[in-house]
């Protein structure tokens, strides 16, 4: 194999990290899962120790219970007639699809009042600092345009590696 071909393969295979969606799957409550806690702030303390981003997933593992995503008012009352999300299958997954606050409660009577509830704060996506265009050297390239350029180079490299 020629060195140029080897280099192109290296560039191609090492570029896969550009296409990976970075998200994390969290198991609520760790090994114990979604159970009635001894400390009624257990789940809020657990949530405060983690950093949640858009597209992260929460997994709720439980037996003979349920999980509801609700409004702030419903969270405070520990009661929901029309939850945003409901699941009672024993292992529920909830995708954090936006920044902001998410409120979760147990749907079993009395469990929320005993501490089976949680507030999750999802961070705003990082945004690059505002760039001031330098009119003497021309407009600056945006991050999206730079990514398109990188992808273009990778595609050309891929075709070059295939046809060399």
Image (cartoon, rainbow, N blue to C red):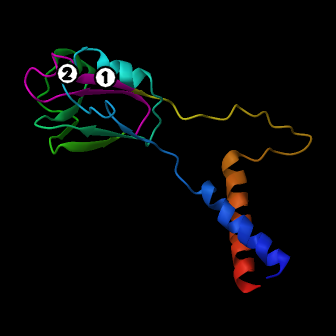
Residue 163: % across, % down: 73, 85
Residue 102 in the image: above or below residue 95:
above
Q: Residue at x 86, y 37 (%)?
A: 134
With 26 as the anchor, is 137 left or right in this view?
A: right
With 126 as the anchor, is 26 left or right in this view?
A: left
Mark drawn on residue 74: 2
SS type, badge 1: helix
Residue 113: % across, % down: 15, 16
Q: Is residue 104 magenta?
A: yes
First to last magenta residue range:
97-120
30 or 12, nearer to the observer: 30
* Residue lying at the far bottom of the rendered structure: 163
Residue 103 in the image: above or below residue 67:
above
Q: Earlier in the sequence, mark 2 or mark 1?
A: 1
* CB contact under 8 Å: marks 2 and 1: no
Q: Residue at x 72, y 72 (%)?
A: 9
49 or 85, nearer to the observer: 49
SS type, badge 2: helix
With 12 as the anchor, is 44 left or right in this view?
A: left
Residue 119 in the image: above or below residue 149:
above
* Residue for badge 1: 43
Residue 151 in the image: above or below residue 21:
below
Q: Residue at x 44, y 23 (%)?
A: 49
* Residue lying at the far front of the rendered structure: 31
Residue 145: % across, % down: 70, 53
* Quadrant assignment for the C terminus: bottom right
Q: CA distance from mark 2 to mark 1?
A: 17 Å
Residue 69: % across, % down: 24, 32
Label count reads: 2
Question: Splitting the image into 4 quarters, where does residue 15 fall?
Answer: bottom right
* Residue lying at the far right of the rendered structure: 136
């Amino acid at each position: 194999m020629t060195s140029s071909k080897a280099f192109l393969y290296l560039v191609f295979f090492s570029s896969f990290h550009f296409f990976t969606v970075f998200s994390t799957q969290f198991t609520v409550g760790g090994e114990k899962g979604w159970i009635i806690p001894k400390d009624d702030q257990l789940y809020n303390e657990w949530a405060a120790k983690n950093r949640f981003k858009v597209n992260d997933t929460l997994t709720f593992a439980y037996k003979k219970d349920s999980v509801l995503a609700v409004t702030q008012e419903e969270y405070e009352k520990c009661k929901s007639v029309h939850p945003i999300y409901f699941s009672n299958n024993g292992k529920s997954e909830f995708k954090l699809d936006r920044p902001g606050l998410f409120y979760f409660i147990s749907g079993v009577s009395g469990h929320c009042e005993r501490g089976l509830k949680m507030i999750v704060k999802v961070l705003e996506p990082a945004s690059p600092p505002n760039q001031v265009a330098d009119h003497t050297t021309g407009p600056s390239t945006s991050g999206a345009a730079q990514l398109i350029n990188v992808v273009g180079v990778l595609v050309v490299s891929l075709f070059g590696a295939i046809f060399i």
